[in-house]
Image: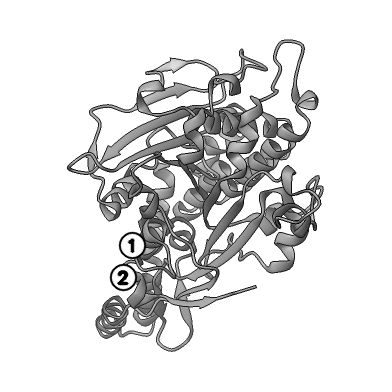
C-alpha cells in the first residue's frame, strides 16, 4: 500500500520536472521553471474535468437511510494489490459526512471469515462499522471485505524481485513501478486459478453476514462461519443492500452474485457431505423483492471477461425480469443497478456497453447499467504539445473524488441529487 502512495506522489511531479529539465538543457532554466509553474497553477485553478453520466437514474444510499423500517448495509470489495483491514477508512469518512451519519460506534467488529464447507481455510477479514446521525434516526452498517490474505502467500513467489539484490540495479522510479506491478499484477492471474473459489466464498460469507438483522447480531472479533439458515430473517426484505467495488472487486462482486443465483437454483451442486447449502425457503422470495445498487469504481468487467466462459444464464433478460416472463420466478433480484465509474485516463478501466451486459452478465440479476465517464485525475497542458493525466491517480482517485462520493450518496436524476453533481456533471437519461 505504501509503495502505491509513494509512486502516486512521485508521478504527480513527473510533468513539471520534465518541463523544467527540457528548458534547463536549452540554457533557460529559471525562465522554464516560471512558465512550468504558471502552466500548473493555471491548470490547478480551472476544474474542467469531465463528468458525464449516461443511463437510468439511480437513488444512491441516502433514500434508504431515510426509511423508518429496515437497515442500510453497504459492502466494500477491494481490487488488486495487498490490503489490510481498514483500507477504506478515508473513503468511509467522506461518505459518512456526505450522508450525515458521522456518529461512529466506539469500536468496529472484525470477523475472520471461514466457510462452513471448508472451515480450516482462512478467507480474509470482514470489518463492520456502525454509523448513525446525531439523533439516531439513521443508521449505516458498513462492511469492508479484505480478501488479500487468500492471495498473499502465492504472491510471495515474487518477493525475491523486491529484494535489494535486484531492486538496487533499477532506476528509482522504475523500481517503485516494478514493486507496484509485483503487488497488483498477480491478483487477476491468481483469481483465474483455484483461489477464485476461496475469494468467492469470502464474498458469499460477507453477504451472509449482511443478512443478519443488525449490529447486535454480529459477533465481536470472532473466527466463525455464517450459515444461511441463521441469516436472512424476515426483516431482510426491508434492508437495503448496496455494493461498492474497485477494479478486480467488480468482477468478484458480479461473480459472487451470479454464484448466489446458481446456488439458489441448484443447491445440491454446491453442497458437500459436511454441509448442505440449501437456503431457507423464504430466502429466495426475500431477495427477489430487492433493488440492488452496485457502484463499480475503475470498472474492469470487459477486460476481465476475456478468456472466460459465459454465465449460466445470458441473453434472457425479458424471460427473467419481466412480470410475464417465462422464468420470472427464478430471478435473483427484482433489479440490479450497476453504476460503472471510469476515468478515460485510467488505463485499466472500461465502460459497460449495452451488448456486453446482455451477453456476458447473468440474466437472473436483472441488470440495468449506468456509465459514468469522469476525470478523477487532473489533466495538465504541456505547453500545447499535448495533455497529460497521471494514470496512477486516474486509477486510484475514485474514492477521494467528491463528485463520485456525492453520486454514491445521493444518486442522480432525483430530487435529492447533491448540488455538486448538479453543477459539475451532465446527465443523459437512457429510457429503454
Q: Is residue 126 above or below residue 322?
A: above
Q: Is residue 66 above or below residue 379?
A: above
- Is label 2 or label 1 in front? 2
* Left or right position of 115 against 324: left
Name the image quarter holding residue 262.
top right
- The residue lying furthest to the top in this view is 274
In percent of the image, x 55 and y 68: which residue is there? 56
Disc 1 target residue = 402
Q: Do the residues labelled 2 and 1 touch (CB within 8 Å)?
A: yes
Frontmost residue, 209 versus 424: 209
Frontmost residue, 222 versus 179: 222
Frontmost residue, 146 versus 361: 361
In percent of the image, x 17 and y 43: which residue is there? 134
The C terminus sits in image quarter = bottom right
* Left or right position of 361 against 143: right
Mark number displayed over residue 209: none
- The residue lying furthest to the front in this view is 324
Residue 167 position within the rendered picture, expressed as x and y whole percent measured from the top left:
51, 42
In percent of the image, x 37 and y 56: which residue is there? 409
Mark number displayed over residue 420: 2
Residue 102 position within the rendered picture, expressed as x and y whole percent measured from the top left:
23, 44
Q: Can residue 354 be seen in this view?
A: yes
Q: Earlier in the sequence, mark 2 or mark 1?
A: 1
- The residue lying furthest to the left in this view is 134
Q: Is residue 199 visible?
A: no
Task: Give the structural element (helix, strand or loop) at label 2.
Answer: helix
Frontmost residue, 90 versus 176: 90
Amino acid at each position: 500500500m505504501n509503495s502505491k502512495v509513494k509512486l502516486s506522489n512521485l508521478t504527480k511531479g513527473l510533468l513539471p520536472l520534465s518541463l523544467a529539465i527540457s528548458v534547463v538543457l536549452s540554457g533557460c532554466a529559471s525562465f522554464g521553471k516560471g512558465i512550468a509553474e504558471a502552466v500548473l497553477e493555471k491548470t490547478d485553478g480551472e476544474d474542467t474535468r469531465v463528468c458525464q453520466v449516461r443511463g437510468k437514474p439511480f437513488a444512491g444510499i441516502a433514500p434508504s437511510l431515510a426509511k423508518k423500517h429496515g437497515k442500510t448495509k453497504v459492502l466494500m470489495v477491494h481490487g488488486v494489490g495487498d490490503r489490510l483491514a481498514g483500507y477504506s477508512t478515508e473513503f468511509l469518512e467522506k461518505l459518512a459526512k456526505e450522508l450525515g451519519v458521522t456518529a461512529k460506534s466506539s469500536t468496529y467488529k472484525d470477523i475472520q471469515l471461514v466457510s462452513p464447507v471448508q472451515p480450516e481455510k482462512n478467507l480474509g477479514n470482514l470489518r463492520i462499522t456502525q454509523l448513525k446521525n446525531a439523533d439516531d434516526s439513521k443508521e449505516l452498517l458498513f462492511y469492508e471485505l479484505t480478501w488479500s490474505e487468500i492471495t498473499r502467500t502465492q504472491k510471495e513467489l515474487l518477493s525475491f524481485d523486491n529484494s535489494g539484490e535486484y531492486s538496487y540495479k533499477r532506476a528509482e522510479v522504475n523500481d517503485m513501478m516494478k514493486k507496484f506491478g509485483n503487488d497488483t499484477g498477480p491478483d487477476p492471474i491468481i483469481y483465474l486459478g483455484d483461489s477464485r473459489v476461496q475469494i468467492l466464498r469470502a464474498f458469499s460469507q460477507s453477504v451472509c453476514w449482511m443478512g443478519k438483522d443488525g449490529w447486535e447480531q454480529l459477533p465481536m472479533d470472532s473466527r466463525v462461519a455464517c450459515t444461511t439458515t441463521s441469516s436472512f430473517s424476515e426483516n431482510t426484505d426491508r434492508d437495503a443492500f448496496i455494493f461498492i467495488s474497485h477494479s478486480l472487486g467488480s468482477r468478484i462482486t458480479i461473480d459472487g452474485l451470479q454464484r448466489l443465483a446458481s446456488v439458489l437454483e441448484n443447491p445440491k451442486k454446491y453442497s458437500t457431505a459436511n454441509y448442505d447449502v440449501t437456503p431457507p425457503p423464504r430466502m429466495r422470495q426475500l431477495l427477489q423483492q430487492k433493488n440492488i445498487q452496485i457502484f463499480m469504481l475503475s470498472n474492469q468487467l470487459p477486460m476481465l471477461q476475456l478468456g472466460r466462459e459465459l454465465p449460466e444464464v445470458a441473453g434472457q433478460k425479458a424471460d427473467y425480469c419481466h412480470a410475464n416472463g417465462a422464468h420470472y420466478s427464478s430471478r435473483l433480484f427484482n433489479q440490479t443497478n450497476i453504476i460503472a465509474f471510469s476515468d478515460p485516463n485510467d488505463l485499466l478501466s472500461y465502460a459497460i456497453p449495452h451488448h456486453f451486459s446482455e451477453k456476458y452478465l447473468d440474466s437472473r440479476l436483472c441488470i440495468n447499467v449506468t456509465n459514468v465517464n469522469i476525470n478523477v485525475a487532473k489533466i495538465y497542458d504541456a505547453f500545447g504539445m499535448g495533455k497529460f493525466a497521471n494514470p496512477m491517480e486516474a486509477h486510484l482517485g475514485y474514492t477521494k473524488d467528491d463528485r463520485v462520493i456525492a453520486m454514491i450518496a445521493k444518486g442522480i436524476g432525483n430530487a435529492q441529487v447533491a448540488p455538486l453533481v448538479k453543477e459539475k456533471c451532465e446527465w443523459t437519461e437512457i429510457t429503454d
